[in-house]
Amino acid sequence: MASEKNFKIKKVYLFGIKNPTITFEGTKNVDIIEPKIYEDGVELEYSINPVGEKDKFSICCILNKNTSTVKVFDKKNNLVYTYRNYLLKRITTKISRIFIRALKMLRAIFITLGKGIAFFWTKYHFLVPPKLWKKYWTDFKTRVRHRDTDSFYNPYNIDEYNKWINKYEKEEEITDLKYKPLISLLIPVYNIGRKYLFECVDSILNQTYSNFEICLVDDCSTNEETKEALKELETKDERIKIKYRKENGHISKTTNDALKMATGEFVGLIDNDDTIAKNALYEVVKVLNDNKKLDFIYSDEDKLNKHGKRCEPNFKPNFSPDTLLSLNYICHFTVIRKSLVEKVGGFEVGLEGAQDYDLFLKCTENTKNICHIPKILYHWRMVEGSTSMAIDNKNYAVEKGRTAIKNALKRRHIEADVNVDEKTTYYIVDYKIKKEPLVSIIIPTKDYADVTRTCLESLYKKTTYKNFEVILVNNNSERQETFDLFEEYKEKYKNFKVIDANYEFNYSKINNDAVKKVEGEYVCLLNNDTEVITSGWLTKLVSYAMQEHVGCVGPKLFYPDGTIQHGGIILGLGGVASHAYIESPKNDMGDYGRLRVPYDYAGVTAACLVVKKSKYLEVNGLEEDLKVAYNDVDFDIKLLTKGYHNVFLPTVELYHFESKTRGYDNTPEKYKRFKIEADYMYEKWGNIINNDPYYNPNYSKNAWFKLDK
């Protein structure tokens, strides 16, 4: 009886005529697969990448053009798949690929065109004012570009990522630096192969910056190869310092021993099988020359697969405290002032597997002098049993990470539950509210009683928070059914009020005037064309808005068809700003769990936004010169400039039936106003718009979390 195969091949793609590349896509029933691939009996190197869901994968390898047969075996030597390669097939595939790409582009054009036709008929009966032709042509090209994924590199596709590396990653010219601090690289060692250990150490010795020392501590390795490699390293370079522990103490004790050996002003953290980029230390010291007060510096990183090929980049934001409570996004490469590491007690014994995470939480509690270098300076090796391959390999690390967060919250005197998101293994912090402060929910409206009723019904049904009031702001309503709705809800609920704002529509002024009149300690700006989905929505939003460092908080919003309408605001995306993940599927997890766990963003939409009233007034509320567009973006940025962080909370969900009351920018007058407001934003906030601190500059400004071709 044949043994069960631990993976299956579902699809095969062959690309290239002269330099063929073959990709196998399939499903697996184990965490780690170790296939063996042969071309005409010769074993091939390959790369494995995840594809969407956890149990799916792709295997990619390069073939010789004369190869006739490719065979794939699993780790138990079961034959999984046989593929026959010949020139005609490759030519046919090349032609079909060109054809499919053309079809994708046509599909993007027709989908966008179809929606445009429906819009033009509904709003204009096809009599579009000439002054708006340029606007709609620009909108059309932008929407097609967003749908045409072939216009961008996918960072999680190993081949596309490496093409991006070859095109954009260049070595910078090295200049002389006045300030040259000693950096001690801390490397705990345990049973690592000679090849990987030497590659790690050599990547340091080959640095363009030379004032460093390497502190290697062996945690009583039992592997003779490791011991011999360390003996070789003792005489390799005078900057190498080695200590041998007499008993195994695990990674925290071992790294603490390395810390005691260190004499540098700063310490850098490196795993014994990883490598750093040639200019890693230079880049760190360069930012220190710009600001000698920096205590904590981290960079972007990627991974090295089994064959040493770079993959799975992590392009990180600038310091994001709420994101850090959701996952250890900082990770590698990290350099910290030694005195700060010593001040917080070094590496916590008992939190092995999350010792770095714990250290980062402690350090960032004790300094604001934090710098992010948006360059890939660290390469994290994917080896069996490593968390770089899959967090499932170290399930204990997930629980240790949860403990590290709980300890951090305890130190900060904050009561909260810390849960693990089942789909991403990241964390969700649910803050506890001891005493519910009054929240004023402000809802501007003009007629559309049916839309407003849907909003109010869902609000009263799904709100478990007790201490709130609803302030409906009437802006020039005319229909009797609207006034009947007002009276109905006044009689039905004691915490329901209507105030008038009978002047020309100005979203900013309407809300500002209302905020001045309400009594709530917190305000919730809510569009009347929304519908609450999540029970307890207000409790969750308010609990985050109550944190001292938080500016405003917003939820995940959906279009009526279930696709995403708002997943946080990214500055400079497609213009002044745009929502992330527009029209993405409802179950999309987002890059690194951005649609599953709390994340810091530059901003959130005022369609649903909660903020402390005192903070609202501190930044003078919404900008009344921005009557319609970008007033929420301007408000978000004002909070950022005051040092607050804005939080996107995807655990709270609402529908948003966009622009129902106000309508679209479908007249020359409205478009002219829109342009004026966009120009206003660039003039006021141009530098911040072009440098969103929560959106890595390596990502495209034409499509969220993609790389430009």
Image (cartoon, rainbow, N blue to C red):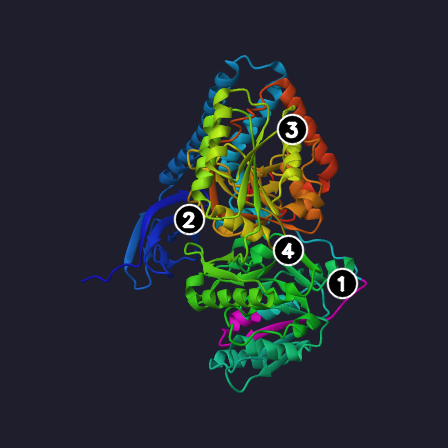
Which dot, 3 or 2, sits closer to the camera?
Answer: 3
Q: Amino acid at mark 4?
A: Glu
Which dot, 1 or 3, sits closer to the camera?
Answer: 3
* 405 part of magenta stretch: no
Q: How many marks?
A: 4
Q: Amino acid at mark 3?
A: Asn
**Sequence order check: which comes first, mark 4 or mark 1?**
1
- Percent across and percent down for residue 706 are 54, 43
* Residue occupying the point 67% across, 22% down: 672
- Percent across and percent down for residue 610 are 58, 45
Q: Amino acid at mark 2?
A: Gly
Circle 1 — which element? Answer: loop
Residue indicated by mark 3: 506
Determine whether label 1 and label 2 are within 8 Å by CB.
no
Q: Quadrant of residue 240?
A: bottom right
Give me the C-alpha separation between circle 3 and circle 2: 43 Å
Q: Residue furthest bottom?
A: 246
Is the residue 552 above or below the residue 257 in the image? above
**Sequence order check: which comes first, mark 4 or mark 2?**
2
Residue indicated by mark 1: 293
- Percent across and percent down for residue 374 are 64, 53
